[in-house]
Image (tube, rainbow, N blue to C red):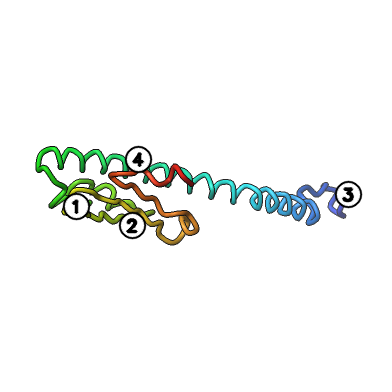
Amino acid sequence: MTQPVSGRRQSGFTLIEIMIVVVILGIVAAIAYPSYTRYVQRANEAEAQGLIMDLASRLEAHRAQNFSYEGATVANLAPELNANTNYTTALVLANSNQTYTITANPTSGMMSGMPALTYNSVTGPGWDAQ
């Protein structure tokens, strides 16, 4: 560095040094963000799977008390599953209310591109086959 006329030495970073730091940060961000996104997707998927299994347990308790699944809804058995913003959940009763299927479809945003989660009272969870 050259000394200015006043005799004081200048301090600070040059433009090249700052640009190198910006490029390095950009490369790190480009590598880290997809990994972070996938980590969040897997965590949200695991949470939804747990909530679906909890709903299945509550449905079985409902059937034990009422001898069918009639009257069972996601809203009255598992309101926390309805409150999950990453998935929209549907409960379909079949065979004269003797069997059911729970389907959780991912919403848009961070969960886009993820598969739907299904649980059938006869065959069990559908995400094990994926």
Circle 1 — which element?
A: loop
Residue at 88 percent of width and 49 percent of height: 1
| Residue 35 x, y percent position in the rendering | 59, 46
Label 2: how many Cα within 10 Å (few below 14, some 14–19, many 20+): some
* Residue closest to the eye, 106 or 25: 106
Q: Amino acid at mark 3?
A: Met
| Residue 90 x, y percent position in the rendering | 28, 56
Q: Residues under labels 4 and 1: Cα distance?
A: 17 Å
Residue at 10 percent of width and 39 percent of height: 65
Please state if 19 lies on the left or on the right of 102 as rendered.
right
Which comes sooner in the sequence, label 2 or label 4?
4
Q: Residues under labels 2 and 3: Cα distance?
A: 62 Å
| Residue 82 x, y percent position in the rendering | 27, 53
| Residue 105 falls in image quadrant | bottom left
Q: Amino acid at mark 2?
A: Thr
User: Mark 3 = which residue?
Assistant: 1
Residue at 47 percent of width and 59 percent of height: 112
Q: Amino acid at mark 1?
A: Thr
User: Mark 2 = which residue?
Assistant: 88
Q: Residue furthest front?
A: 95
Q: How many marks?
A: 4
User: Mark 4 = which residue?
Assistant: 50
Circle 2 — which element?
A: strand
Label 3: how many Cα within 10 Å (few below 14, some 14–19, many 20+): few
Which comes sooner in the sequence, label 4 or label 1?
4
Which comes sooner in the sequence, label 1 or label 2?
1
Which comes sooner in the sequence, label 3 or label 1?
3
Vertical comparison of 55 with 108: above or below: above
Q: Residues under labels 3 and 1: Cα distance?
A: 74 Å
